[in-house]
Amino acid sequence: MSTYFHHVDALAFQHQVAATSKELHFRLDELIQASKASIDAFKESIRTQKPTEKSPGNVFQYRLTSLIALVQTYKDLIKEAGLGFSWGSLIADVAHADLMQRMRNSLVHDGYRLIALWAEGKFYVAVNIRRKGMRGEAVEIEAPEQDAEMLCLEYVRSFSAELSARLRELPESAKLKGPYYDYDWFAAAMLHPAIGEFRQPMPSREEYAKLKTDESSPLDIAVGVLTAVRDVCEARMKERLQPPSA
């Protein structure tokens, strides 16, 4: 193994903003599919007048946990990526931001799963919850009227719209460019024992510098992904709000 250490700098964190936005898109799609499956299972149960055996209750719970965990990921990234605005200012007008942060803390710090009610194929926080905060203070989580999928759709739509708008407003000088990994990273990675017989000789540093790379700013990539995320939310919310077919 080499003695090289990769320095995680502002450019690396801006790449992570793009990567986390792609993960947000993935986690949102996962949640929507689990919710659709649950609602379809309920409708099938009504049609057949038999208890459903297809409700993906645990699947929805696990996917909700994965989605909510990204709240903290973004919070840390905003601080380290040199974006010029704070997490607090970003989420000031984001729908359900405080509630989602409290739900995230309950899941991560307490391991307490809030979703405990299933009605018409939808999942809900059944009752208000009081938990201890990091300093021992009482923290209250009021059960929202919305089901968990709709709550997430409203939050993610608002958050992605706000973050993409903030990123668009940044001066070009703040949008760093460069590869995710530099020459030294690849040179060190090639020494990993797992590569073994598949190890290939590295080009010289000069030859490597001539290789064509993507010149896009990772923050511009993030804007495109976040815009797509917002569109997914709006399409699903519109679908959910349509009256049921006869």
Image (cartoon, rainbow, N blue to C red):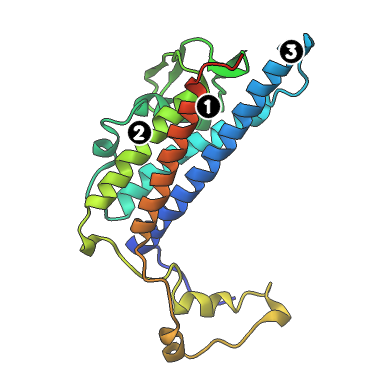
Residue extending farthest to the front is 246
Dots 3 and 2: beta carbons under 8 Å? no
Q: Which residue is mark 1?
A: 110
- Find the distance from the CA under tag 3 to the CA under tag 1: 39 Å
Q: Which residue is mark 3?
A: 47
Q: Residues within 10 Å of mark 2 (few under 14, many from 20)?
A: some
Tell us which disc is closer to us: 3 or 2.
3
Amino acid type at mark 1: Asp
Quadrant in the picture for the N terminus: bottom right
Q: Which residue is mark 2?
A: 158
- 133 to 84, vertically: above or below: above
- 196 to 164, vertically: above or below: below
- Find the distance from the CA under tag 2 to the CA under tag 1: 27 Å
Taking depth in this image into account, of 230 and 152 the one nearest to the observer is 230
Residue at point 74% right, 13% down? 47
* Image x and y of residue 13, in percent: 38, 57
Q: Residues within 10 Å of mark 1 (few under 14, many from 20)?
A: few
Q: Does residue 83 appear left or right of residue 75 in this picture?
A: left
Residue at point 55% right, 86% down? 202
Closer to the chain start, of discs 3 and 1, is 3
Closer to the chain start, of discs 3 and 2, is 3
Residue at point 45% right, 24% down? 151
Closer to the chain start, of discs 2 and 1, is 1
